[in-house]
Every structure is written in C-alpha cells, then in structure tokens.
Image (cartoon, rainbow, N blue to C red):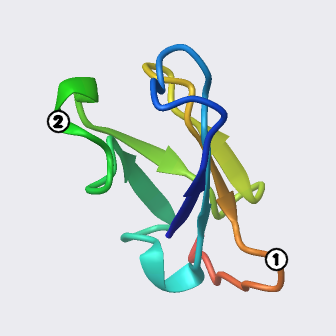
C-alpha cells in the first residue's frame, strides 16, 4: 500500500492510497482507517469495495483507495 497526501492532516485534504491486489480482503475490499494512518485520525472501521470499479472513497475521512495500475482482481459473483 502506498499513500500520497497534500497535507499531514487527512481530514483537511484527502489522500490517495494505491493498493495491490494482494492488499484486498475477502471480496475485493480494503478497510479504512488503514494500519498506516496515525492514531489521532481513527474513525469507525469501514470496508471499501475497490475491486468493482477500481477505486473507492472512505465516507469518513475522504481517503481514496485505488487499485494499482495493471493489478487484476477476480471477484466471485
């Protein structure tokens, strides 16, 4: 997982986190807050589907999780 942000304060400026297929849990989701986020910025854990459209946004902090270019995910329907 790699992260980029314009500010050290996620609630002020949303960051983008690029995820590899190996970072996905279960049916193609990631959870937020992720383990690399500072403790002060924690919010309730939410699961974000990135496998369906290639990215998803956290409703709490605005962090965008984007599937890495060239990564392929097989999602069972």
Percent across and percent down for residue 49 are 55, 51
Residue 9 as seen in the image, left or right of residue 40: right
Circle count: 2
Which circle, 1 or 2, is nearer the viewer?
2
Residue 43 visible (yes or no): no
Between 19 and 47, the one nearer to me in the picture: 19
Kindly identify the residue that appears in the image at 46 percent across and 67 percent down.
27
Q: Secondary structure at mark 1?
A: loop
Left or right of residue 60: residue 20: right
Which residue is label 1 attached to? Answer: 69
Outermost residue, top direction?
12
Q: Residue at x 58, y 78 (%)?
A: 20
Left-right relation of 1 to 47:
right
User: Could you give the CA–CA distance between mark 1 and mark 2, rounded to whole angstroms?
Assistant: 29 Å
Q: Residue furthest left?
A: 39
Q: Position of residue 21 (x, y in %)?
A: 57, 81
Going from the N terminus, do you reach mark 1 or mark 2 first? 2
Q: State the residue position of label 2.
A: 39
Disc marking residue 48: none
Q: Residues within 10 Å of mark 1 (few under 14, many from 20)?
A: few
């Amino acid at each position: 997982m790699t992260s980029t942000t314009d500010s050290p304060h996620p609630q002020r400026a949303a960051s983008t986190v690029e995820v590899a297929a190996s970072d996905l849990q279960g049916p193609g989701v990631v959870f937020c807050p992720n383990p690399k986020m500072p403790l002060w910025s924690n919010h309730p854990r939410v699961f974000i589907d990135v496998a369906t459209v290639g990215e998803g946004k956290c409703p709490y902090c605005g962090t965008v999780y984007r599937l890495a270019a060239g990564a392929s995910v097989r999602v069972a329907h």
